[in-house]
Amino acid sequence: MNEPKRILLGVSGGIAVYKSAELVRLLRKQGMEVRVAMTAAAAKFVTPLTFQALSGNAVHCDLLDAESENAMDHISFARWADLMIIAPATANLIAKLSHGLADDLLTTLYLAATCRVYVAPAMNQAMWSKPVTQENIAALRRHGVHLIGPAQGEQACGETGFGRMSEPQEICAALLTVSSGLCLQGLKVLISAGPTREPLDPVRYITNRSSGKMGYALAEAARNAGATVTLVSGPTQLPSPEQIDLVRVETAAEMYDAVITRAENHHVYIGAAAVADYTPVEVRPEKIKKQDEQTTLALHKTKDILAEVASLRVRPFTVGFAAETTDLEAYALDKLARKNLDMIAANWVGQAQGGFDSEQNALEVFWKGGRETLAMTGKNRLAELLIGLIAEILKAKV
Ligand code: PMT
């Protein structure tokens, strides 16, 4: 994608509209041309005049406005943009976008847009966590929309939780990451994601709580940064990401084979999967019968995929994850050194927030001579930040 210069900002009606006015100012400061389309509800929170003054362009509100259609019809308007950002995107607007409704200017522009589209949701925390909203969000993701936020914190309604629109600075930074170019262009990135399943008998297995969300988000962020991505995934409920070579596996041994046979052919390996450390010594051909009060499972160690990748003769830049419930830094630094990694991203697990099977996460990233804290945010945004960091360290190594 070429550097975006022309930004189409869609504004729907929520209290966070005032933040979008600041977003226009920040984008203009970065030398971007901004045109604004508002819904009728948005115009009740902040007048179009404010956006007109800040953007330096007439603001569009109506689909069937003969005057503005004369100046630039809605199809040309959608085509004009290098990038579209909808901020704030209310629950109602997200529902409409995810179902392809086009009953006003903003939804029509979204449907007509051929550029990359970003959406910054903003709504009450209960509305955000409603299954129907989450289904709509998942649909938008499947349709290739990139999410920024939402953030967690105190909301205008007085409640606390996820649903706040990300701050304008954060949205601007996310859009600038795109405009700063494709930081992994030309590179091949191999990522592992999800849990593994270690069978005990035909009906039972040992597994863990990994949903695959972190690894899939990394795969999409690496693809968006221009990389050719192979994703080796344990069993997950996630849809196959577009334009990514997806290799499905089940056990730690299958994941080992899938990764090791490909690793030398990649520039970067990121081990985000929660691979079983132990697997049953024996897989029983028949269902194990209930007998004694207590029973013991004999397990043996699985092969350490990450350490093996790091010890390859032609090794990719190797990034491990560390999932810890205590002494995060000490354990992460130990894994970095012991497995001879280039970088390690450590996260707290087993807590209320972040880690396994949640929408958000935070990472403490360590590499030789450096460290960075990536604060709690949505896994998509976190993945973009980690990919940016990997690209930076890689660049410094060359
Ligand atoms: O999938 P989600 O629900 O989104 O959750 C994300 C996550 C919590 C799973 C992810 O952020 C994470 O922490 N992944 C690593 C989990 C893990 O197994 O951590 P560990 O500290 O036990 O292992 C350290 C590293 O060794 C990991 O990179 C792991 O992939 C790797 N490993 C472990 C065992 C093994 N046999 N082979 C390996 O390669």
Image (cartoon, rainbow, N blue to C red):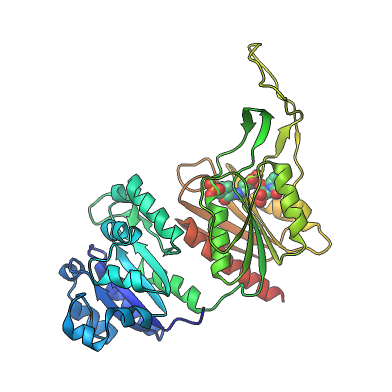
How many labels were placed on the picture? 0
Outermost residue, right side: 313
> Residue visible at 76% across and 52% down?
307
Q: Nearer the viewer, residue 70 or 393?
A: 70
* Quadrant assignment, res 80: bottom left
Q: Single out the residue that lies furthest toward the top.
A: 292
Place residue 38 in its image quadrant.
bottom left
Residue 318 lies left or right of residue 22; in this view the side is right
Answer above or below: position of 316 versus 3.
above
Residue 340 visible: no
> Residue 382: x, y in percent?
50, 60
Residue nearer the viewer, 21 or 313: 313
Q: Is residue 386 shown left or right of residue 259?
A: left
- Judged left or right of residue 245, residue 78 is left
**In the figure, is residue 39 to the left or right of 28?**
left
Q: Is residue 115 visible?
A: yes
Q: Where does the C terminus fall, quadrant-wise? A: bottom right
Give the vertical position of 96 relative to 396 (above or below).
Answer: above
Work out whether residue 199 or residue 312 is closer to the camera in this orientation and state it: 199
Q: Position of residue 65 (x, y in %)?
A: 17, 79
Q: Residue furthest left?
A: 44
Residue 320, compared with residue 235, is above or below; it is below
Q: Residue at x 74, y 59 (%)?
A: 263
Q: Position of residue 191 (x, y in %)?
A: 64, 57
Coordinates of residue 35 in the picture (x, y in percent): 30, 81
